[in-house]
Amino acid sequence: MKDPLILAGREFSSRFILGSGKYSLKLIEAAVQYAGAEIITLAVRRANTAEHENILDYIPKGVTLLPNTSGARNAAEAIRIARLGRELGCGDFVKIEIMRDSKYLLPDNQETVRATEALAAEGFVVLPYMYPDLNVARDLVKAGAAAVMPLGAPIGSNRGLSTKAFVQILIDEIELPVIVDAGIGRPSQACEAMEMGAAAIMANTALATAGDIPQMAHAFRLAIEAGRAAYLAGLGRVLERGASSSDPLTGFLHE
């Protein structure tokens, strides 16, 4: 069954996005080959380097680049980084990351809305990383975001869906793809997010710190596909109390 992820009119068959903060050739190869990644993030500062190693050398052709504004502390800095990424040939997709907090790396929602509005007006396909707040998500929709990317847990923590209740509110109320970003540490957590109705999952640390990166990438692919299929099928009801027999309780055999 064809069920593409659609972002700004572009179709993607995979619902796994690789965040490449802890990038390596092995990680990127595994994400593309075993997880089916069609979108990979990159920090613009890594594409704008005079050093011998450049992340762009590792990303296969045909994969959509999602430059991020990592390091930006306010909207002005994020806008400048996004424009630089476009000039470097990274395309029109951009992931907005604005963080003044260096301890917990939580996104600055207000500055994110400002940057989203400015960049969307310039023709960027803006995917903003945000703390899951319904009012902020609505502001991002009005600002022209192509999706919203709420965190599941703090970046790099692998804690899973700490913000599950709030992410569910966004999925239920926002008419844009909701991509769960940051904190997903296990395939089961990715599956759970997809069962909730998330449009896609972004992960990095879970793969990068795994004992067997290709095997973990494959596990994430299966989990995301299973979670999506379960969501489309419609999950069964949950009883708050008591039990419900799956077989008739009549017609017992009598001696």
Image (cartoon, rainbow, N blue to C red):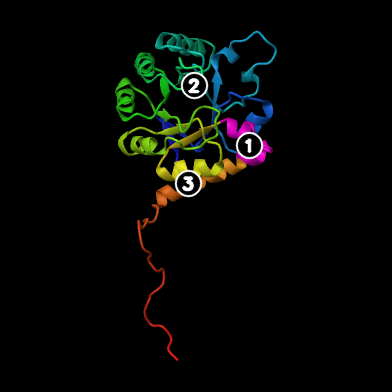
Dot 2 alpha-carbon crowd within 10 angstroms: few under 14, some 14 to 19, many 20 or more? some
Q: Is residue 16 within the magenta segment?
A: no
Q: Which mark is residue 105?
A: 2
Q: Which residue is mark 1?
A: 33
> Residue 255 placed where, x, y %?
45, 91
Disc 2 from disc 3: Cα separation: 28 Å
Whether residues under marks 2 and 3 lie with C-beta atoms below 8 angstroms apart, the answer is no
Amino acid at pointer 2: Leu
Horizontal and vertical percent position of residue 219: 60, 43
Please give the name of the residue rendered at 50% of the width and 30% of the height, measured from the top-left corner. Answer: 182
For marks 3 and 1 on the same chain, the one whose residue lies earlier in the sequence: 1
Most common SS among magenta residues: helix
SS for callout 1: helix
According to the picture, the residue beneath numbered tag 3 turns out to be 227
Residue 35 picture location, percent across and down: 59, 38
Frontmost residue, 61 versus 42: 42
Nearest the eye: 130 or 223:
130
In x, y percent, where is residue 24?
A: 66, 25
Q: CA distance from mark 2 to mark 1?
A: 30 Å
> What amino acid is labelled 1 in the image?
Gln
User: Which residue appears at 42% of the width and 89% of the height?
Assistant: 254
Quarter where residue 79 is shown: top left
Q: Secondary structure at mark 3?
A: helix
Number of residue marks = 3
Indicate which label's residue lies in the foreground, 2 or 3.
Answer: 2
Horizontal side of residue 82 vs 215, given as left or right: left
